[in-house]
Amino acid sequence: MAKIEIANPIVPIELNFINKYLPQANPTHVMVYIYALGLCYSNKQSDNASIAEALDILESDVIKAWKYWVKTGLIALGEDGTVTFLSTHREEKSEKEASNIKALEEPKAKPQAAKAKVEEEAKPSRRDIPMEEITEKMNIDKRFSDTLRLAQLIWEKPFTQTEIKSLYSFMEWYSFTSEVLTMIVEYCALEEKTKNIKYMEAVAESWANDGITTMKMAEKIINKKQKELSMLKKCAQIFSLGRGFSDREAQYISEWTNTFGMSEAMIKEAYARTTINTGKLSFQYMNKILSSWAKDGIRTLAALKEAEGARKGVQKPQSGNTSSNYDFDEIERLEIARRMKKKQ
């Protein structure tokens, strides 16, 4: 560990670190960074095992923290394991840092045995956690026991031992906070069919790989999913489909909602035009209409009428009436008649 001799017991942390790097980092990574920085300013040496014991985390979590901060350019690791803290205002990494990162990500120059060790350390610990250990953790760790209790309330059922073990494992494997873990449970409960442990395992791994480690990031994903599910229900009513959506159809609706930014009214308008022009529901035809509107920056009925009026040389309407001219009752009647005729 790097040595810094200083009389002042205060550990200075750059404001740029607080504003730029801290909000994006895993809480465990931040904890390791600040604790080790304190050791440096106290002129104390330590190792990964001692840091893990002091912070009550796994040694593999300490190694992952070092790898993360190396990639950000805030520390450099010497061949002997010495940690050097670097300024957060460095705009470009030095050749030493670049080679350090490359050595961590692609340790090709190392012997095969050493390479295997680095790759093994880089992976999350996936040990089979005994239920006795988890039960003890529930008794002494109020945050985890509260998280488990809340998870069972969200899923409206008591968790099995397998589900409890999985929930606890996510905290150890991915260093999730109790709050983020609860958000994963809530995300899986948005649909009844996804309220199962296999799906939750997939979501947890996906979030960990995508670096989703804060409440704000998790809430953003949940809000997006809720928006998609809400639009699926609205589209089912608009189309009078009488069945569930296929994966491809759901993908279309997700794109209209999140990528194109279309409202229910705009999707309804596109459906009306599709039905009139093709005589049936066609997702491909609707997609062409909505993608064209999105490309032109048209996302409201008022903007649509104004754009079409301008193309026809029609003066911009003065009234605030922006409702569609299509009779949806008539469209629905024609669609039902078409289906009945097809069945005969």
Image (tube, rainbow, N blue to C red):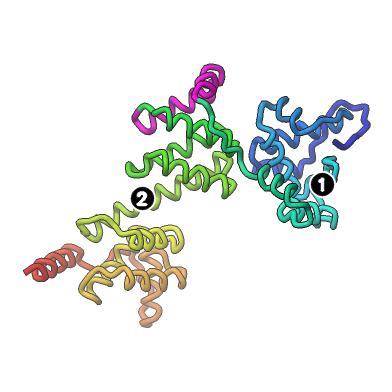
Which sits in the foreground, 160 or 69?
160
Q: For residue 243, what is the image quadrant?
A: bottom left
Q: Residue at x 82, y 30 (%)?
A: 46
- The quarter of the image holding the C terminus is bottom left
Answer above or below: position of 278 versus 156. Answer: below
Which sits in the foreground, 125 or 113?
113
Q: Position of residue 84 (x, y in %)?
A: 85, 42
**In the image, residue 284 lies in the stretch drawn in magenta:** no
Q: Is residue 95 left or right of residue 227?
A: right
From which residue to which does the magenta span run?
A: 131-157
Q: Is residue 178 left or right of residue 12?
A: left
- Residue pointed to by mark 2: 229
- Residue pointed to by mark 1: 76
- The quarter of the image holding the N terminus is top right
Q: How many marks?
A: 2
Q: Label 1 amino acid?
A: Ala
Q: Residue furthest left?
A: 344
What is the magenta segment's predominant secondary structure? helix
Q: CA distance from mark 1 to mark 2?
A: 45 Å
Q: Position of residue 185 (x, y in %)?
A: 44, 37
Q: Label 2 amino acid?
A: Leu
Q: Residue at x 40, y 62 (%)?
A: 256
Q: Is residue 145 left or right of residue 241?
A: right
Q: Are marks 1 and 2 in contact (CB under 8 Å)?
A: no
Q: Residue at x 57, y 38 (%)?
A: 126
- Regarding residue 158, the answer to whether it shows in the image is yes
Q: Residue at x 54, y 39 (%)?
A: 215
Q: Which mark is residue 248?
A: none
Asked which secondary structure carries label 1, the reply is strand
